[in-house]
Image (cartoon, helix red, strand yellow):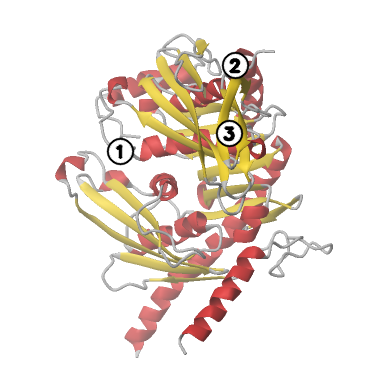
């Protein structure tokens, strides 16, 4: 996170005062999300894709599936790889070039949620144990940055995974031969991330850009479909008290159930 | 002749890798290294160990061996990074290629990039950065040998290096992980427990301010288990805090003794 420019300090006071009285600049309640829109299957060439709008924040996720070698310690499991790009067209503060620490952190938070909740049934993605497995590439593409990229990216990744279809195949002498038809990627869990910002010692959910610029610290909790916590990440220059952390866990549980209804149909 | 001992060690190393312990905690709640569930690893901390650095510290926590050094406050390079109202804090967490079983490439991995960021954000709340505008404070953490919990041990050590450099601070930052292994909540996970366990919760604390400056988690915990794990980790941090203060004091005892002689 780039340090807040000095001019923001003026706004900081206004936002902090509002938050203390339980209000926000855009009229939301402290634990309310912005409007969420999810579109799936937006990229036909990808095995799965989704575009999520969280207020004005816009993130696309695409899934590509390739074959490759498994990790030696788990020879009969497929491989999951998450990458995130802060595309320069998404914000005047994003620059071209290899992923910086913010992009790496974003990708690793999304990765941890999916990996630790065991969302993808990776053991079903083995072609030949120790030799050939499927690699699921999740590429998160930030298209417009208006705050809370973490939750938007986690939503886009999950929506894209649920939309992913794999080609049918059979093995012929160790080679994969593609057969007609598709089957959905085996998904057994739905991790959902909820991000808090601490402003003036109060917790707010789903901070937008101006709130992010003035927040003291950030906390993301990812919960799975059973309401268990599978990943946490604190960020920002400030700190949390233990009471705030426990309060956040309880709010996160309510919020993930609410978001799950939007993202996971049926 | 050289080959014989080498092959021996190689074999031994592979054995260690292949042997997956069936049980990490026995029926008497004893862990593989003989610790109780809520016990820290034996920890040795030393302050002021490097000649060139403005501040430095070294920790041995179980098999972890970690060096931390601080340079600054000093002029910022490149200049455009300087902030007119505060010091810029920079941090590099790095693992030596020989610190783990399989050689690690010295190029920074994505894990190291992320850890450098979260460690910086764990230490920054403790520093009065506004006292040193237009300067930088650089923190370097080198993991010489890793055995789980290196980000936490790195924070514990780097905080002492900052204090050793004479940088004004609100409090020391002590860090420790807790987690779930074989269905039990345990303190200060070592590598095997981290890899085979069900969850890992690294946490950093400024004990006098009840301020949690780093919190991460991976694995699977119910909210109730998570609360217990946080409280366990807080306990660990407080124990390490005592060790930190002792280490800091003992440097000056040594200096005083040298002067008296």
* Label 3 or label 2, whichever comes before in sequence order: 3
Q: Quick check: B91 left or right of A63?
A: left
The percent coordinates of residue A74 (x first, y second) are 62, 49
For disc 2, the marked residue is A263
Label 2: which secondary element = helix
Q: Quick check: B80 left or right of A170?
A: left
Q: Chain of mark 2?
A: A
Q: Residue at x 56, y 47 (%)?
A: A70
* Label 2 or label 1, whichever comes before in sequence order: 1
- The circle on residue B82 is none
For disc 1, the marked residue is A98
Label 1: which secondary element = loop
Closer to the camera in the image, A90 or B34: A90
Are the residues tagged 2 and 1 within 8 Å (C-beta)? Answer: no
Residues at marks 3 and 2 on the same chain: yes
Q: Residue at x 55, y 15 (%)?
A: A32
Q: Chain of mark 3?
A: A
- The circle on residue A114 is 3
């Amino acid at each position: 996170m780039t340090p807040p420019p000095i001019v923001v300090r003026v706004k900081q006071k206004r936002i902090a005062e509002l938050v203390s009285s339980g209000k926000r600049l855009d009229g939301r309640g402290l634990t309310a999300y912005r409007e969420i829109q999810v579109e799936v299957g937006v990229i036909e060439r990808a095995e799965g894709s989704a575009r999520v709008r969280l207020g004005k924040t816009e993130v696309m996720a695409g899934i590509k599936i390739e074959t490759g070698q498994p990790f030696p310690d788990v020879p009969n499991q497929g491989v999951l790889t998450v990458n995130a790009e802060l595309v320069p067209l998404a914000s005047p503060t994003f620059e071209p070039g290899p992923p910086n620490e913010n992009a790496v952190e974003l990708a690793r938070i999304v990765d941890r949620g999916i990996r630790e909740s065991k969302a993808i049934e990776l053991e079903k993605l083995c072609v030949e144990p120790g030799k050939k497995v499927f690699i699921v590439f999740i590429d998160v593409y930030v298209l417009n940055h208006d705050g809370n990229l973490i939750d938007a990216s986690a939503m886009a990744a999950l929506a894209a995974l649920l939309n992913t279809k794999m080609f049918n195949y059979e093995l012929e002498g160790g080679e994969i031969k593609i057969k007609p038809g598709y089957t959905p990627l085996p998904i057994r869990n739905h991790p959902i991330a909820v991000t808090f910002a601490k402003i003036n010692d109060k917790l707010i959910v789903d901070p937008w850009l101006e709130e992010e610029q003035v927040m003291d610290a950030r906390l993301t909790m990812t919960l799975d479909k059973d309401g268990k916590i599978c990943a946490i990440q604190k960020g920002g220059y400030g700190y949390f008290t233990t009471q705030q952390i426990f309060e956040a866990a309880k709010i996160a549980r309510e919020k993930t159930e609410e978001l799950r209804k939007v993202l996971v149909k049926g | 002749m050289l080959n014989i001992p080498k092959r021996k060690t190689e074999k031994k190393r592979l054995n260690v890798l292949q042997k997956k312990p069936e049980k990490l905690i026995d029926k008497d709640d004893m862990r593989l290294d003989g610790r109780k569930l809520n016990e820290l690893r034996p920890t040795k901390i030393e302050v002021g160990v490097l000649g060139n650095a403005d501040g430095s510290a070294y920790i041995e926590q179980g098999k972890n061996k970690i060096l931390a050094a601080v340079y600054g406050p000093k002029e910022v390079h490149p200049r455009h990074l300087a902030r007119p109202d505060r010091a810029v804090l920079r941090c590099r967490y790095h693992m030596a290629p020989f610190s783990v079983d399989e050689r690690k490439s010295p190029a920074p991995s994505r894990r190291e990039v992320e850890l450098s960021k979260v460690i910086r954000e764990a230490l920054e709340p403790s520093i009065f950065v506004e006292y040193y505008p237009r300067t930088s404070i650089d923190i370097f953490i080198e993991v010489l040998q890793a055995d789980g919990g290196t980000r936490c041990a790195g924070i514990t050590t780097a905080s002492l290096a900052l204090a050793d450099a004479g940088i004004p601070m609100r409090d020391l930052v002590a860090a420790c992980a807790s987690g779930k292994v074989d269905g039990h909540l345990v303190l200060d996970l070592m590598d095997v427990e981290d890899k085979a366990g069900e969850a890992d919760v690294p946490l950093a604390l400024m004990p006098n301010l009840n301020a949690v400056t780093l919190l991460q988690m991976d694995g699977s915990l119910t909210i109730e288990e998570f609360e217990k794990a946080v409280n366990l980790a807080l306990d660990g941090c407080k124990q390490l805090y005592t060790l930190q203060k002792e280490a800091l004091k003992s440097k000056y005892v040594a200096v005083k003794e040298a002067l008296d002689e």
